[in-house]
Image (cartoon, rainbow, N blue to C red):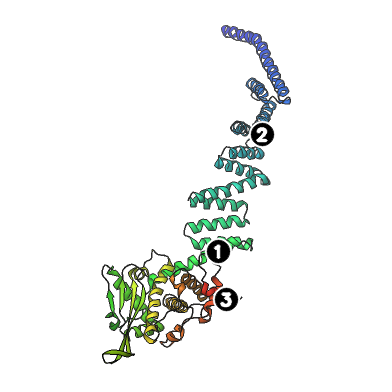
Amino acid sequence: MGYKLKKWALILALVSVINPFCNDIAFSRGNSAVYYYNMGVDFQNNGKYTLAIKNYQKALSLNPKFSSARKNIMYAYLSLANNYCQNKKYTLAIQNYKKVLGINPKMAEVHYNLGLAYYNTGQNNLAIKSYEKALKLKPSLSEAKNNLIALYFNSGINYSNSGMYDNAVYCYKKALEYNPNDAKTYYNLGIVYNSLGRNEEAIQYYQKAVSIDPNYASASNNLEYSVKKVEEADLSAQIDKLVPAQKFPAEIQNLIRLNRSVNYAALGRLYEILDFIWSDPEGQRLLVVIMNNKIPINITRGSGDTNAHVSVTSYKNTLTYAGFPIFSYKTGQNKEISVNIGEDHILAFKNPNLPTHTRIYSFHAVVHELCHAAKNATSKANDNAMSEEIAASMIGYNIASKVIQGRSLTGKEAEEYAKNCMKAVLKDDHRFLPVYDNFISEIQKCGVYPPYPYLYQNVVQLYKSVRDDPEIQRVDTLERMIPN
């Protein structure tokens, strides 16, 4: 027991000696921390932020709980970062903004400034994250919101130009989250969806753009284009599903000839096209004329040799006297007509990989040449004219519409087709044809009626409506017929 008392007495004696010494050390450290803190304040007040930071660090190493030093070092880093930004030393600015946020991560303006620094070093994704953090902390920070909208919008453009359409969609939609009434962003989204072949969705975004800005001409034009693309896709699907209601007679099959080197598949496809034509009342009347006049239908190679060919042989009788001819007179003539259809036109109609207008044109081309042949079979004249080319085309497109869509062309559709036909005539040798003939009256004798003839029967008036198109050639004969 006595030993233990001595032992504790010794310990107490040692403590009484060491304790004052420890207190002196703690006091000394506290005074040193304050010293370095004060030095830091002086340097900071004089704009010497690097030296201020070093002294604050020394103070904190001596006293980690020195809150004033911790607060001041944060603002010294901030001042230093701002100076680097002003001098366009963005990498150094980023390092110091990060140190500020390491001390206090809830400073919205610092996240915003960090976003600016990231943006100026081309680190857009990091800039976006910084702006988003700034807005989360302070939703009223309009600068961060505006910069975020611009970044997402411009990123959408860059992704779209690079063909990275899914990324572009993401960026544009993020921009709309922050600015839901921007017509330009909706318009750009429409373009991306067009590029993806998702025209139905493109329509929705163009409609939104136009609803925000009714005078947005580009959005209105693209909306019209997208609607047409959707309609064409629907038409193409309808063509794929078409089944003819009737079969054309065997008498017509006997008139079909397959030229050498022609794809044999064209024969079966022509049968199908003729079935569709026969299923339409006017188309059937055309084929009856072909059948009754035994006009051969030739499948030719390629697409260039597509026409209705007419050759006329006249028979004469000559009176002679003393072995010399003195008078000749015509006793009759033989007219040979044939229809030539290029295999490319025939095969195109049911080719789902081709644009819809090409598929419709291929069907129209067959009807077009049948119209020429039928007119030549029923008319004494063997002429052709611009009016015949346009009217025959209109019949072809109208029968195609009835076969594919189950209805005749509307007035608006007929007007558009008529103008396109006129432009086509003016782009090739058909522009040298006479202007008028009797085609419409002659084809009507066959029971076939061109749709809305008033839109194109006056060829000069139709020409005037398209003459300013830069792709066509103006025709002197037609120019002279336009009243001053």
Mark 3 = which residue? 482
The residue depicted at 51 percent of the width and 64 percent of the height is 226
Amino acid type, mark 2: Gln
Near-viewer residue (3 or 403): 403
Mark nearer the viewer, 3 or 2: 3
**In the image, residue 451 lies at what x, y percent?**
48, 81
The image quarter in which residue 371 lies: bottom left
**In the image, residue 169 lies at what x, y percent?**
52, 53
Mark 2 = which residue? 86
Which quarter of the rendering shows the C terminus?
bottom right
Q: Are marks 2 and 1 in contact (CB under 8 Å)?
A: no
Label 3 SS: loop
The residue depicted at 67 percent of the width and 46 percent of the height is 142
Amino acid type, mark 3: Ile
**In the image, residue 246 lies at what x, y percent?**
34, 81
Judge the density around disc 3: few (<14), some (14-19), many (≥20) Cα neighbours within 10 Å: few
Q: In the figure, 28 relative to 375: above or below?
A: above
Instruction: Determine the residue located farthest toward the front in the rendered image.
Output: 322
